[in-house]
Amino acid sequence: MTATAAESFAPEDLADQAAPLDALLVDAARTPPAFDILFWNSDTTRMSARLHADFVGLAMDDPVITPGEITLLGVPIDLSQVEVDSYVVAGIADHLTPWQNCYASTQLLAAGPGFVLSAVGRRTRHLRLRQLRGTDMHEGIGRARGTDYFRIGDQLTDEERDYLRRARDFVDDEVLPVINGFWERAEFPWPLIEKLAKVGIVGDGIEGYGCPPMSPIASGLVHMELNRGDGSLGTFLGVQAGLAMQSIAMLGSEEQKQRWLPAMARLDKLGAFTLTEPTHGSDSVALETSARRDGDDWVINGAKKWIGNGTLADVVVVWARDQADRQVKGFLVEKGAAGYDARRIDGKGSLRAVWQAEIELADVRVPEENRLPGATSFKDAGRVLAGTRNAVAWGALGHATAAYDVAATYCAQRQQFGRPLVSFQIVQDRLVKMLAEVCSMQLYCLRLGRLIEEGTLTDTIAALAKMNNTRKARQVIFEARDLLGGNGILLDFHVMRHMADIEAIHTYEGTETIQTLIVSREITGVGAFT
Ligand SMILES: Cc1cc2nc3c(=O)[nH]c(=O)nc-3n(C[C@H](O)[C@H](O)[C@H](O)COP(=O)(O)OP(=O)(O)OC[C@H]3O[C@@H](n4cnc5c(N)ncnc54)[C@H](O)[C@@H]3O)c2cc1C
């Protein structure tokens, strides 16, 4: 039962205990939106067989004790979202228990509206509805529907499910309620970063050095979920873990790894990655920032643009061309280095809650021990980027999922012409096409994870996945925005933020066109851009 729906039925209205559930759930035209509570202690003998079967499964599997996703009348329900207050040993036969008794018992246990979850001969659980305010449609919208039509979840290990669950809970409980304000004010969400640090999901699958042990798929799921919540947070993670930490993990010395990675995984230290320059974006291979060896130091001069965390970072990976051999090398510039000047880029209409910087490097001195020993040419920067393009593909999936979930929830609630939007065939057609795109993106991502596990992910596969998923995400979000009508442009409904954010994601780490040129060079054997 939806929380909104539950509140619209006062207990005294429930003359017939079975009727409200059936009216809410069994009418095919009324797909129930996101659930906060799922089992009314109703007379199960009067439920439809389908609903009864779902309830029996629910009771037998005991998913409240073992959290997991189940489906009720085809609608995924995230049981971890149900707040369990206390247990009551009742041992009642539910079809013999009048609903009034159940309701009364919940009132003894908590002040808020509550219901009893019970089954024949089993302990009864008292559940409290998440507090939702009135009839505001946007309350609770955006929470995960667990969209997984192709049962990707079956492919996950318990550990991967655990990462997914933690990232999802963080997004639903901590991010969604507050993120729109940060986005609107273009404010960096420090309180969320502090909370994110405690969730233990920053590390991008780097082995050891205090990073949480994550498989490539677990790492992808974390990118997906953070972006499902918000592109700024997803981008923050991409810069911190995908670009900065991975540069150090892949190319750094043992001392550099020991010094930076554990603190970065805890978010005690922030990182940045500077490749793009004001005059070199897509052709960053032609970067002009220079590095000159001077005794035990290097002297770096140049300019960078669009650098995530550039004004905040404790350690900045700077890519510069060695004047001696003309090769691109990587250097770790530490906070406070003389000659490092970063200015925040203001006036963005996308990813407003994460900051990028324009940076000037004027005779910045870096000791030789801060050079990344594994970075000896531009190809090494490219190796880091191949990994982050994989992460962007997962992130784009998160954006598309968010848009689809909101649209599906909204269309089930919003009534026009006396019926919910989901009862119109054109709306159904659009939702199914959106779902099809989301599913195809999920399958891409699952395969990306497997290829990384096997060690066979190539730059071009990552490029194709990034291109496909950001392009599809744009389309799905575009559809969702329209399906929400006027509400679609309100931040409260989240989709507009995703629509704005996906534009930056579509561009960074190489535009759609550049990814296309990379893939086409391989399939045709003809380079059209270099
Ligand atoms: C929000 C945000 C965050 C970012 N974060 C970082 C970061 O942390 N670190 C970092 O180093 N960089 C970062 N970037 C930079 C990003 O990677 C570049 O913006 C991107 O690579 C595109 O470069 P550009 O903006 O200079 O566009 P340009 O290269 O000028 O491209 C403009 C247009 O021309 C097209 N184009 C270019 N070349 C060709 C061609 N040969 N054929 C056909 N079309 C072409 C492009 O596809 C695009 O449509 C970030 C960018 C943004 C917007």
Image: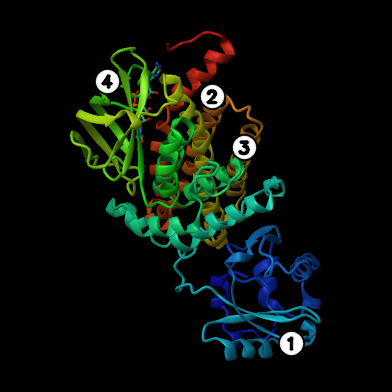
Dot in front, 4 or 2: 4
Quarter of the rendering occupied by the C terminus: top left
Q: For the residue carrying disc 3, how many other residues have a C-alpha within 10 Å: few (<14), some (14-19), or many (20+)? A: many
Amino acid type indicated by mark 4: Arg
Q: Is the CB of the residue bearing disc 3 within 8 angstroms of ligand 1?
A: no
Q: CA distance from mark 2 to mark 3?
A: 14 Å
Relative placement, left or right, of 143 versus 40 is left
Question: Can you tell which quarter of the image residue 127 is in?
Answer: bottom right
- Asked whether residue 30 appears in the rendered view, the answer is no
Amino acid type indicated by mark 2: Asp
| Circle 2: element type | helix
Say the numbered circle drawn on residue 90: 1
Amino acid type indicated by mark 3: Gly
Sequence-wise, which precedes: disc 4 or disc 3?
A: 4
Amino acid type indicated by mark 1: Ala
Q: For the residue carrying disc 2, how many other residues have a C-alpha within 10 Å: few (<14), some (14-19), or many (20+)? A: many
Q: For the residue carrying disc 1, how many other residues have a C-alpha within 10 Å: few (<14), some (14-19), or many (20+)? A: some
Dot in front, 1 or 2: 2
Q: CA distance from mark 4 to mark 2?
A: 31 Å
Q: In this orientation, which residue lies closer to the viewer: 76 or 238?
A: 238
- Asked whether residue 341 appears in the rendered view, the answer is yes
- Residue 57's x, y, as percent? 78, 66
Please say if the residues under marks 1 and 3 sit with CB atoms less than 8 Å apart.
Answer: no
Please say if the residues under marks 1 and 2 sit with CB atoms less than 8 Å apart.
Answer: no
Q: CA distance from mark 1 to mark 4?
A: 77 Å
Dot in front, 1 or 3: 3
Sequence-wise, which precedes: disc 1 or disc 3?
A: 1
Which residue is under mark 4? 293
Q: In this orientation, which residue lies closer to the viewer: 226 or 367?
A: 367
Question: Can you tell which quarter of the image residue 92 is in?
Answer: bottom right
Q: CA distance from mark 1 to mark 3?
A: 46 Å
Question: Can you tell which quarter of the image residue 295 is in?
Answer: top left
